[in-house]
Structures are given as structure tokens and as C-alpha cells.
Image (spheres, rainbow, N blue to C red):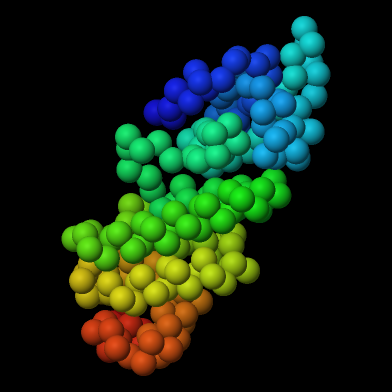
């Protein structure tokens, strides 16, 4: 469940933001302050319109309410992580897109930095980052023009290919098989690294996927 605790650190506003997810479910976040929102995201502030009872209202579409809450947390306090719970790599990727859509470059930089941090930390842990494959699919579908972001993911996958068992991971194999640009980029990244990573022979033979 999304954590709204950060709002308790600020005086309550009178604005409300309706969140609509792809499955058509709508939910509303209340007591928002448009002035605070506008300090970091003027574009979102301008989307609020005065409705009944002089209450500013806006609508935002997102894959989940969690993404919107993370977005608001950043707008309010400059950071979107809830350090009490692990964060999915997909959340960071979706926030990169949100930052691009609402023209918030500081959020885009932060989200990419968190992807770098998550992938680097995972290199010393026994499992891949949370929602790795979902993040890969999202990035290639919506952020294909952000080469530094893609390079971050590719270098992690090549470096930890054997360590995290990506070649035997059913979900990862399916992702690489279905997403041909991703598989091609994996091979190119391995080549650029001088084939120094043990996973190279498994990556370059597409028939094995």
C-alpha cells in the first residue's frame, strides 16, 4: 500500500489528484498543496483546475498509484524513496518516464542514479534487482532514447549474467527472446567489454534462448 506519511510533515492543502490506472480503477489523493507541487513541477501545478467548492482538482494517468505517490513524495521533499521498504527497479524506470513527461529533470537524474545504485548493490547480493525484467521491458518500450539508462541495465546484465543465473532464469530468457533489440544490445555490450564476462558464450547464441 502506498505510504502517504510524508504529507504529515507539511501543512495540508485543499487540492485533490485523481489517479487513473490502465485497468480503469480510479483513486483520489487529497489534501495536496499546489504551491508546494509547483516549486518542483510547474507543469503539474498548472493541470489543477478549480472545481466545486473552489477545490483545485487534477487527473493523472499512471501504471499504479505507487508511482504517483513516489512522484508526489519527490515534489514535496526532494526524494521519493520510502526507505522502510525495498524499491522495485520498475518504479525507478517509471519515474524516469514521469520526470520526462512532466519536465522534471532533477527527478530523472535521481531515478537514473537510483537504478545505478540498485544494479551496483545487486552485484554483491545473490539475487537480481526487484522486477528486473519488467523494468527492461518498460525501458525498451518507453525510454529507448535514453542510452545512458539502457547502458546501465546492459552492463549490469552482462557483468552479473552467470552470478545471478540470468541465462537459466526463465523470465529473463523469455525477455531476451521476445525483445530482440535487448538481446542484440546484450551481445554488443559484451563485445565492447572485450568479452571479459563469463556469460558471453551464452549470450551470443540466440538459439539457446
Across and down, in percent, residue 164 comes to 23, 67
Classify residue 21 by image quadrant.
Answer: top right
Farthest residue, direction top? 53
Instruction: Please name the residue shown 33% across and 43% down the image.
Output: 86
Q: Is residue 209 above or below residue 112?
A: below
The residue that appears at 46% across and 82% down in the rendered structure is 184
Q: Is residue 179 visible?
A: no
Figure check: 71 above or below 121: above
Q: Is residue 18 left or right of residue 205?
A: right
x then y, percent, for residue 23 = 54, 37
Q: Is residue 117 visible?
A: yes
126 or 186, nearer to the observer: 126
Left or right of 177? Residue 51 is right
> Which residue is drawn at the image coordinates 34% and 77% (left, top)?
158
Query: Camera-side residue: 160 or 207?
Result: 160
Q: Quadrant of the N terminus?
A: top left
Vertical side of 40 occupied by 142: above or below: below
Where, quadrant-wise, is the C terminus in this rendering? bottom left
Question: Where in the figure is residue 190, as x and y percent of width and height?
Answer: 38, 85
Side (left or right) of 103 relative to 114: right
Residue 182: x %, y % from top left: 46, 74
Q: Decide: is 79 above or below 57.
A: below
Residue visible at 66% across and 22% down in the picture: 33
The number of discs equals: 0
Left or right of residue 34: residue 99:
left
Camera-nearest residue between 122 and 208: 122
Q: Nearer the viewer, residue 93 or 123?
A: 123
Amino acid at each position: 500500500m502506498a505510504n502517504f506519511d510524508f504529507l504529515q510533515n507539511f501543512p495540508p492543502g485543499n487540492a485533490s489528484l485523481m489517479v487513473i490506472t490502465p485497468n480503469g480503477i480510479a483513486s483520489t489523493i487529497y489534501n495536496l498543496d499546489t504551491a508546494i507541487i509547483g516549486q518542483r513541477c510547474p507543469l503539474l501545478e498548472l493541470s489543477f483546475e478549480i472545481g466545486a467548492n473552489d477545490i483545485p482538482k487534477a487527473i493523472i494517468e499512471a501504471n499504479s498509484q505507487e508511482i504517483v505517490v513516489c512522484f508526489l513524495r519527490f515534489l514535496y521533499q526532494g526524494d521519493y524513496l520510502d526507505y522502510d521498504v525495498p524499491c522495485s527497479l520498475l518504479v525507478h524506470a517509471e519515474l524516469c518516464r514521469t520526470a520526462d513527461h512532466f519536465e522534471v529533470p532533477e527527478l530523472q537524474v535521481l531515478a537514473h542514479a537510483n537504478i545505478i545504485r540498485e544494479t551496483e548493490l545487486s552485484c554483491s547480493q545473490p539475487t537480481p534487482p526487484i522486477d528486473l525484467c519488467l523494468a527492461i521491458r518498460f525501458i525498451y518500450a518507453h525510454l529507448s532514447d535514453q542510452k545512458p539508462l539502457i547502458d546501465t541495465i546492459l552492463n549490469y546484465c552482462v557483468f552479473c549474467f552467470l552470478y545471478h543465473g540470468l541465462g537459466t532464469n526463465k523470465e529473463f530468457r523469455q525477455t531476451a527472446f521476445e525483445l530482440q533489440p535487448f538481446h542484440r544490445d546484450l551481445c554488443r555490450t559484451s563485445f565492447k567489454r572485450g568479452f571479459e564476462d563469463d556469460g558471453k558464450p551464452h549470450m551470443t547464441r540466440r538459439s539457446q534462448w
